[in-house]
Amino acid sequence: MAFSPKIRRYLVVFLIIGWSLALFNSALRFNSLRYPLKAKQLYRDNRLLMGTFWEVTSPNKQAGAIVFSEASRIEQLLSKYIATSEISRLNRLGKLKVSADTFYIIKKSQEFCRLTQGAFDISVAPLVDLWGFTNQKFRVPSDDKIRAVLKLMGSDKIILHEKDSVVEFRIPGTRIDLGAIAKGFALDCAVKKLKESKIDNCLINAGGQVYALGDKFGQTWKIAIRGARKSEIAGTLELKNKSASTSGDYQQYFLIGNKRYCHILNPKTGYPAESGISSVTVIADSGLEADALSTSVFVLGKEKAKELAAKFNNLEIKITE
Ligand code: AMP
Ligand code: MG
């Protein structure tokens, strides 16, 4: 059949429009099969827990409640600010049979202590108190007092009785503080609970300590890292099934003149860490690893951080000096 040139032009235009519509339609259907239009909403929920502001973002409405209930459970076990927590009771009694979670995190902390040659040390608790970081009554202690407290510290002062889940301190006066690792552990526990509830996409931000589970409707979760000195954004990270933890000298500190004394202490000297780092972000597969290692790198400094990183898989370290 022969068409006039004018009719042929119309036919071509119709065909192109038809194909375009068909393509657009199938793209829409493909996307809405993966992410039904109704579910393209994100729910945000926040809560104060473990001394910080937790924010949960997820396409699933239940995610916030699941995360908060798990973080609160861990806080009740590990917080030194809760008199009935296992850590407070252990610190008072010097020996205690503890839950599997508490035993696990103390055991992991001992491993980090060995891996960092003592830079990461949960027996830092009496030193944290001495500098006034527990009750915000800051002071520079005398060298005598620092020396006395250092004698209570070290991983050899903590005995783990694996068989009956008992933790015991070798000498009176030793105490532990899980502030450098508990939030990371709580993130991992929360992520486990989310997965058990078939929630595969969620961003948890616990005061700058983050776990990014899955993605946001097919796009990686993006998080901002704040600058060490100014409150502006220093950079952004794209994370999927990873945790990022930042330790910095701007988070808790006091000044005497221009001298800054921060809350991360060097167990070798008894003084606040001065490794030339003002902020470090560690990206790892688990919250526990990211949290423990960001504190460790802050104490160890840039050069030793490289040696430490070589002992782990998939570790990324971003340092601001
Ligand atoms: P983070 O903010 O995770 O780096 O942890 C800092 C907190 O960990 C401090 O507030 C102390 O409670 C505790 N801490 C301080 N220095 C150390 C250290 N060298 N090893 C382990 N925990 C520490
Ligand atoms: Mg930490």
Image (cartoon, helix red, strand yellow):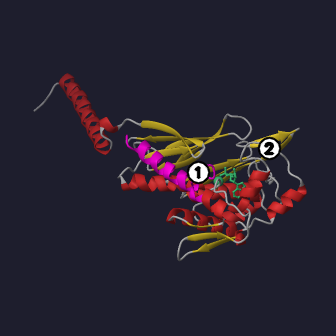
Choose the circle earlier in sequence order: 2 or 1: 2
On the image, the x and y values in percent for residue 42 come to: 41, 37
Q: What residue type is labelled 1?
A: Ala
Q: How many marks?
A: 2
Q: Is mark 2 within 8 Å of ligand 1?
A: no
Judge left or right: residue 261 versus residue 212: right
Residue placed farthest to the bottom in the image? 163
- Can the viewer see residue 218 in this picture? no
| Quarter that holds the N terminus | top left
Tag 1 secondary structure? strand
Q: Disc 2 versus disc 1: distance between alpha carbons?
A: 29 Å
Q: Which of 198 and 108 is in front in this view?
A: 108
- Can the viewer see residue 25 in this picture? yes
Q: Which of 10 and 91 is in front in this view?
A: 91
Q: Which residue is painted at 72% across and 43% down in the image?
A: 252
Q: Name the residue under label 1.
A: 244
Q: Mark 2 points at which residue?
A: 138
**Magenta segment:** 61-87
